[in-house]
């Protein structure tokens, strides 16, 4: 058994937890990487604090030829989050036998539908469009259409540009466009 006089003086004050640490200050490059990492974390926290990364609704409105088309859409959303769509059509001259609303079909590829309110009377696909036909309102000149939907789970981030149009005799009488951003 070794006695105290045989102890190596060079190991005094060093244990296993500090043995691999260096005595020199970190290099300039390493300091900049750490600063950039901290700045990125601070940016994410600030954006979250101001609710700039969370789900957000947008709205667009168009008027033409006696029609007003207003669309509330999911401007920013994430996988698994609600993505409601609300369309209001006002026709000052009234509606015919049906109200045809045309959507870009690509917007619906990543949604899990819950239900339309009211339910469409008919649905037609004419790529790259989906055309829904709704019964006109029993009274008045305004119809409100809502889609209860969620973004499908497991979707990666991307943007979708979509156009919504009101059709009369298969011709668009009013249109508006929006962009929806699905974050990862």
Image (spheres, helix red, strand yellow):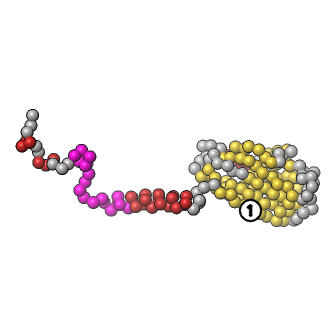
Magenta span contains residue 31: yes
Residue at (89% x, 53% y) in the render: 137
Q: Is residue 163 left or right of residue 96?
A: left
Percent of width and height locating residue 16: 24, 44
134 relative to 35, above or below: above
Viewer-proximal residue, 61 or 11? 11
The quadrant in which residue 28 appears is: bottom left
Percent of width and height locating residue 122: 85, 44
Residue extending farthest top: 1
97 relative to 47, above or below: above
Residue at (79% x, 55% y) in the render: 87
The quadrant in which residue 92 appears is: bottom right
Percent of width and height locating residue 184: 57, 50
Within 10 Å of the Cα at label 1, are there few (<14), some (14-19), or many (20+) other Cα atoms? few
Q: Can residue 145 be seen in this view?
A: yes
Check disc 1 and report its element: helix, strand or loop. strand
Say which quadrant the N terminus sits in: top left
Where does the magenta region start and end?
A: 15-32
Q: Is residue 161 visible?
A: no
Q: In this view, does 21 lie to the left or right of 56?
A: left
Residue at (26% x, 51% y) in the render: 21
Percent of width and height locating residue 12: 15, 48
Q: Mark 1 points at which residue?
A: 60
Residue at (63% x, 45% y) in the render: 80
């Amino acid at each position: 058994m070794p006695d105290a006089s045989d102890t190596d003086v060079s190991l005094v004050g060093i244990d296993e937890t500090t043995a691999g640490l260096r005595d020199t200050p970190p290099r300039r490059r390493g300091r900049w990487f750490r600063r950039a990492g901290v700045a990125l974390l601070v940016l994410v926290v600030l954006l979250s604090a101001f609710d700039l990364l969370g789900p957000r609704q947008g709205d667009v409105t168009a008027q033409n030829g006696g029609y007003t088309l207003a669309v509330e859409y999911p401007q920013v959303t994430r996988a698994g989050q609600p993505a409601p769509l609300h369309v209001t059509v006002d026709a000052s001259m009234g509606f015919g036998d049906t109200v045809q609303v045309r959507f870009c079909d690509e917007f619906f590829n990543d949604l899990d539908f819950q239900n339309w309110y009211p339910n469409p009377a008919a649905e037609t696909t004419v790529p790259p469009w989906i055309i829904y036909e709704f019964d006109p309102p029993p009274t008045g000149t305004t119809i409100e259409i809502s889609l209860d939907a969620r973004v499908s789970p497991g979707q990666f981030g991307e943007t979708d540009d979509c156009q919504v149009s009101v059709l009369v005799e298969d011709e668009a009488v009013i249109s508006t466009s929006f962009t929806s951003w699905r974050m990862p």
